[in-house]
């Protein structure tokens, strides 16, 4: 009997989903639980910030607060290698804080405290005994999106039908590399059903909330990570991105992230939400999210230097390069894309982008306006959507039918309106590839003719919107279509008074602009580099990060 | 009226084809023509070698013979930069010799003597005036497969329906880069109709013959180049390869060649024989053919160092690396594939491969036998063939119908027998990609688990066979499926007495083994490197080249 013939009753899939959710929750030690009357107020309809809960709840010690708030990953590793902190201390602190984050924003899918502490102990003992670190990520707790496999742990990726799968017996390639470099895995994080919407919501684990304002989306598909990191429940997370999945949650939750060029980080060994073997020209990409660009450099250098092409034949054999030292001193040339006609920028994002460009200009860098040279992105990104619709067998929906579970609400608005009756065909795919080549040529010409080092643009037209209202991710998916490396940097916060001067009466904002709901929410910029020049993009983003911090 | 409705008469396309062929021939200066009674004996049914015709015909001076025979491209450039030879002298010598090659083997499609001499003069004047070379290929005559575009010259690629196209107005990306590096273009060379067979034969230019024995194939699709180079009518040629098109002619004509990893040499701006936008996972690759591996290093380094990704967005942004200096001194580990069951090696190739392996072993390198670990290649290469059959509109045959011309005979045997009724579909393509991933994994595992630096294998099971009998290119197409860099080195010659001990009574040779026809024909080996490690493959091939020369 095939899965689709299973006589499933609604009660069955709901009971199954609940049992899994409860089993995760029960892995939180009793001492780390918030009082029930407190925890019960953290719902998707309560417009409060929960960012200060870890500090006020009394569960973390002063030292644990300091460990989880003060350092980036590079710092923490250095402190552990010097023996000023132990991995046990650091891991315990992040486990506790992740537990609080989960109770406020519902960001976790798997909790692995015992395994994490055993591993942390192993790292501490190794250092003591050998007098050297396990590797460049010695003792560092790293959080993982649920789609990564960790030996002995489940990867349900939010499909009820996957709950009956046994725990995995192998690590994803990237997990194996991080492990060998010294990482400690302690939690996996929440994602949307199908991983193709911007709301990290599924029938097993429910919905992840935005810690800045629980009524707003945490973004997706790596929403659990971004929410956890914004809560300082993780210092470094591992995400994936095919239309913005690592950048959307970052910009919603006010953290930073990087989508490298495809296939530099090995993708093998994870659990795909859809069918393997896509003939499309957009590949899913693994990248880090967290607190600092130098951490992403550490992350990517560690992975690429491990020769991941020996683990995953789809990973590109491109050794990690040390970019030209002059790049950090150079006056850079940034192309600036301020908007695309179909998705005008909400005032807070227009102001953030303007402020970033002005700060860079004031620091001596050059800004070249590209708005008139790129046409409306909507048509280009429609092509990306066609690539996402190439599976004639609709595999994600087979996974839903296998349990009888309901589709989540945001799936309804994640389709491309003009493509509702579009059907893919082999013949069309040839023409799509020709069309993609012309989009690539357009942006390549821009980079070459304008002598650009990077492009500065929005990652989304707004700050985090309400649940199930994010819509199409035009500004992020364009970059996936191009396969250019890109990152998100948080920059400023929505401020209705300051933002007012960027309000345009003549445009239709989508989603609607609500200055009250947006107030105080983090704004952002997106920085886009040249293809396969990930090393250079990181350098450039460190320059931008420094300039923005100086002007914050 | 669409092309397919044109009321074409047989006489029309034949007349059109002939007029183009004659117009090319008429570009040979009268003084360089062989006597008609001599030229008329060079037919595809006359089993003679024409290799000594340039030396005996009296058309080239002693110095021109020396220029065209003695040096590789690296040497010639050095001599021109030092002023010991002028580009005019070198270009004239190769133009003359190419004209003789054409009259004996029918290897050319376009002859550009006037443009070449003007360009050579420009290079000489530049050097005189500026005291420095134009670039790393200063003044060097380079021959081009017909599918490359040279401004002002036609690219008919053997389709009669393309004869009425005007001369092209732009250079292919690779042509532009070579030009800027100092190259002189003087001839384009013959290819098969559709470029998907191993016989360089079409209705415009006729059939290119093998200069070692005119009754044997020169190979394809870059057959004109290999024949020209074997005649010393070119020192360095530019080829393409999607199933073996740069390696098949090389091994048939006794020259060397390299197929780099896909997309390191920019492919943009040429004339494709089929439809653009293939969703298949096998890309056509540009590579050099000629006389020495160090020339290919010069060629590839020059191209990649020019940042070809700024001309062609499909070219990979991977800077040229200097491989670890230790590689040349190291004892290398070679995997050895001696045969695949469905295509047992003819005795001359079995002996060449055995001799190469023994020589490498004697030089201290390690040989690891892989025969039992790879299964029959036939099934893996069938997958490659499916990728070649993905165009539902059969574009190459549309190009044939547009003029009404006949298909060439070898097209009948270039299909995959088991796929004669196979039809591609989008759904199948997903499964094909999954299957390809498993083939990649198999060979990656071999490289990693055995610690291999390269694989030694045949490029074909035989020496050049008779016209229209080459069959399926199993040993070369496997490497395209993998997208591993690979090259051909000539090694030894068929010798029926020495070969006898490699004869197996129990196997069925395909094509049939005929020791008399094979006698004296060049044998070869294929060396296969790791993906994207083109720099390392060149170093390894230089090591092999040196060992084989020492033992020749």
Image (tube, coloured by chain):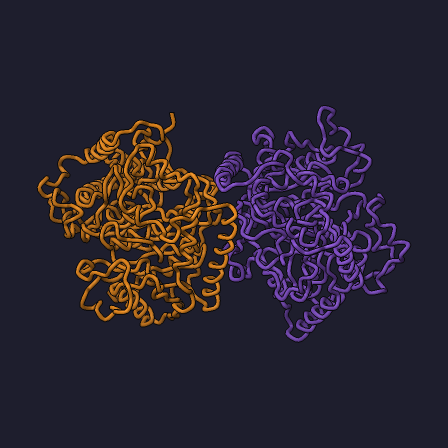
Chain colours: A purple, B orange
Image quadrant assignment for residue A112: bottom right
State the residue in front, B65 or A157: A157
- Where is residue B412? Give x, y as percent: 30, 47
Say which residue appears at 66% left-offset and 75% top-offset: A129
Q: With B376 as the anchor, is A331 left or right in this view?
A: right
Say which residue appears at 50% left-offset and 34% top-offset: A449
Q: With B90 as the anchor, is A71 left or right in this view?
A: right
- Where is residue B395? Give x, y as percent: 39, 38
State the residue in front, B97 or B271: B271
- Where is residue B380? Give x, y as percent: 42, 58
* B187 w.r.t. B465: above or below: above
Q: Quadrant of the N terminus of chain A?
A: bottom right
Q: Quadrant of the C terminus of chain A?
A: top right
Say which residue appears at 35% left-offset and 56% top-offset: B474
Q: Residue furthest left?
A: B37
Number of callouts: 0
- Where is residue B51? Give x, y as percent: 17, 51
State the residue in front, B552 or B23: B23
| Residue A119 visible | yes
Q: With A183 as the anchor, is B172 left or right in this view?
A: left
| Residue B142 visible | no
Image quadrant assignment for residue A83: bottom right
State the residue in front, B98 or B464: B464
């Amino acid at each position: 009997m095939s899965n689709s013939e299973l006589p499933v009753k609604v009660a069955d899939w709901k009971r199954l989903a609940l049992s899994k959710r409860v089993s995760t929750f029960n892995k939180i030690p009793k001492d780390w639980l918030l009082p029930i009357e407190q925890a019960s107020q953290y719902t998707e309809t309560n417009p409060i910030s929960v960012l200060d809960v870890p500090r006020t709840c009394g569960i973390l010690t002063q030292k644990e607060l300091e460990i989880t708030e003060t350092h980036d990953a590079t710092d923490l590793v250095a402190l552990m290698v010097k023996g000023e902190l132990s991995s046990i201390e650091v891991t315990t602190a992040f486990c506790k804080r992740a537990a609080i984050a989960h109770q406020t924003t519902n960001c976790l899918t798997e909790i692995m405290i015992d395994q994490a502490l055993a591993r942390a102990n192993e790292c501490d003992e190794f250092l003591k005994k050998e007098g050297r670190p396990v590797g460049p990520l010695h003792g560092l707790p790293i959080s993982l999106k649920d789609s990564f496999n960790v030996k002995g742990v489940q990867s349900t990726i939010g499909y009820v039908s996957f709950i009956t799968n046994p725990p995995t017996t192998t690590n994803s390639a990237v997990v194996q590399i991080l492990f060998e470099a010294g990482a400690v895995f302690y939690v996996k994080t929440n994602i949307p059903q199908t991983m193709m919407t911007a709301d990290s919501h599924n029938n097993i684990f429910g919905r992840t909330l935005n810690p800045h304002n629980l009524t707003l989306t945490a973004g997706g598909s790596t929403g659990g990570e971004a929410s956890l990191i914004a809560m300082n429940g993780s210092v470094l997370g591992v995400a994936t991105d095919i239309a913005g999945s690592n950048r959307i949650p970052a910009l919603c939750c006010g953290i930073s992230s990087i989508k490298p060029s495809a296939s530099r980080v090995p993708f093998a060994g994870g659990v795909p939400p859809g069918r393997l073997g896509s003939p499309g020209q957009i590949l899913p990409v693994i990248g880090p999210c967290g607190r600092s660009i130098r951490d992403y450099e550490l992350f990517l250098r560690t992975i690429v230097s491990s020769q991941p092409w020996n683990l995953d034949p789809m990973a590109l054999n491109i050794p990690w390069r040390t970019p030209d030292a002059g790049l950090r001193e150079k006056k850079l040339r940034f192309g600036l894309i301020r908007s695309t006609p179909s998705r005008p920028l909400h005032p807070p994002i227009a102001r953030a982008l303007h402020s970033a460009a002005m700060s860079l200009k004031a620091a001596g860098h050059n800004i070249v306006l590209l708005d008139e040279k790129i046409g409306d992105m909507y048509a280009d990104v429609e092509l990306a959507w066609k690539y996402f619709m190439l599976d004639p067998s609709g595999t994600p929906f087979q996974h839903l039918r296998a349990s009888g579970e309901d589709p989540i609400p945001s799936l309804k608005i994640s389709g491309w309106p003009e493509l509702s009756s579009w059907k893919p065909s082999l013949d069309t795919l040839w023409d799509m590839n020709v069309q993609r080549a012309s989009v690539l040529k357009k942006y390549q010409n821009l980079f070459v003719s304008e002598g650009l080092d990077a492009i500065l643009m929005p990652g989304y037209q707004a700050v985090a919107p309400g649940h199930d209202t994010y819509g199409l991710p035009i500004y992020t998916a364009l970059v996936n279509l191009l396969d250019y490396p890109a990152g998100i940097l948080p920059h400023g916060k929505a401020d209705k008074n300051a933002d007012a001067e960027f309000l345009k009466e003549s445009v239709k904002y989508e989603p609607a602009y609500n200055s009250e709901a947006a107030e105080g929410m983090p704004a952002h910029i997106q920085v886009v580099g040249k293809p396969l020049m990930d090393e250079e993009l990181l350098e450039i983003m460190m320059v931008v990060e420094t300039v923005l911090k100086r002007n914050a």
